[in-house]
Amino acid sequence: MSVALALAFPEPLRLWLSPPPVQGLDARTSADGRLLGHFPYGEASPDDLVDVAPGQALHRDAAEALLAMQRAAAADGVELVVLSAFRPAELQEELFFAIKSERNQSALERAQVSAPPGFSEHSTGYAVDLGDAYAPQSQLSVNFEGTQAFAWLQANAARYHFTLSFPPGNAQGVSYEPWHWRFEGTAAALQLFEPAHRLTRS
């Protein structure tokens, strides 16, 4: 956007005059930077990622905390399974558009359950989808809230600096996801997710 355009038009109008931030998605960001409810996030550097499960990686800070949390859960008879961790923008784009088309969903409907590319917490390396090894039928479903794993997470996840990203009725307008947790145990992670906290507080 040119400086002249930025000076000539107020913020709401500039948002609509700017091109959509995601190619192939006819939606624009809101005044606080969100796209269809999701905040923008950069992609973690490969140098910061470590494996937490076959084919799954997290930022090294989140990975260390997750592995400690899994060990503690196992000691209590609960097996936390990593279903999805870091996702590059290319994979997020594939997930968003392919499933949107497959399910004949509108962009808004799809965004309620999956972030557009460039707007996913998973791209930061700090977010992880968790399941219960003893209740595989509940994976990536609201039914996960009825599992021992979810009950354990509610009681213990904060000790490992994990928080539920999208609780029921969240201010972002994203569907309730009891399986989706993000790590906030470092200053860098807290700074990344401050806009989401600020929205919740407002």
Image: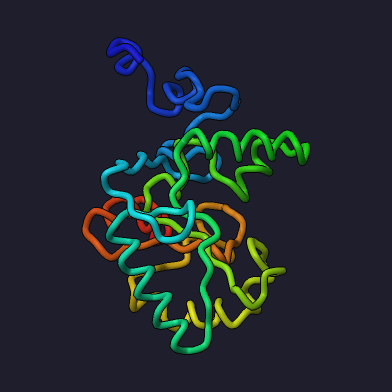
Quadrant that contains the C terminus: bottom left
**Image quadrant where residue 147 sits:** bottom right
Q: Residue at x 55, y 40 (%)?
A: 36
Q: Quick one: which residue is furthest to the left in this view?
A: 187
Q: Quick one: which residue is furthest to the front in this view?
A: 54
Q: Quick one: which residue is furthest to the bottom in this view?
A: 76
Residue 104 point in image, percent of width and height: 78, 37
**Image quadrant where residue 133 sits:** bottom right
Quadrant that contains the N terminus: top left
Residue 154 point in image, percent of width and height: 48, 79
Q: Give the colouring mode of the picture.
A: rainbow
Q: Is residue 198 left or right of residue 47?
A: right
Instruction: Name the foreground residue: 135 vs 184.
Output: 135
Q: Residue at x 35, y 50 (%)?
A: 195
Q: Is residue 26 left or right of residue 123?
A: right
Instruction: Name the foreground residue: 188 vs 128.
Output: 128
Q: Is residue 161 left or right of residue 97?
A: left
Can residue 166 be spotted in the picture? Answer: no
Residue 162 lies, with reference to residue 44, above or below; the image says below
Q: Residue at x 30, y 10 (%)?
A: 4
Residue 146 point in image, percent of width and height: 65, 78
Residue 71 lies, with reference to residue 6, above or below; the image says below
**Image quadrant where residue 159 sits:** bottom left
Q: Residue at x 45, y 19 (%)?
A: 18
Instruction: Name the foreground residue: 89 vs 46.
Output: 46
Residue 43 point in image, percent of width and height: 36, 40
Can residue 31 be spotted in the picture? Answer: yes
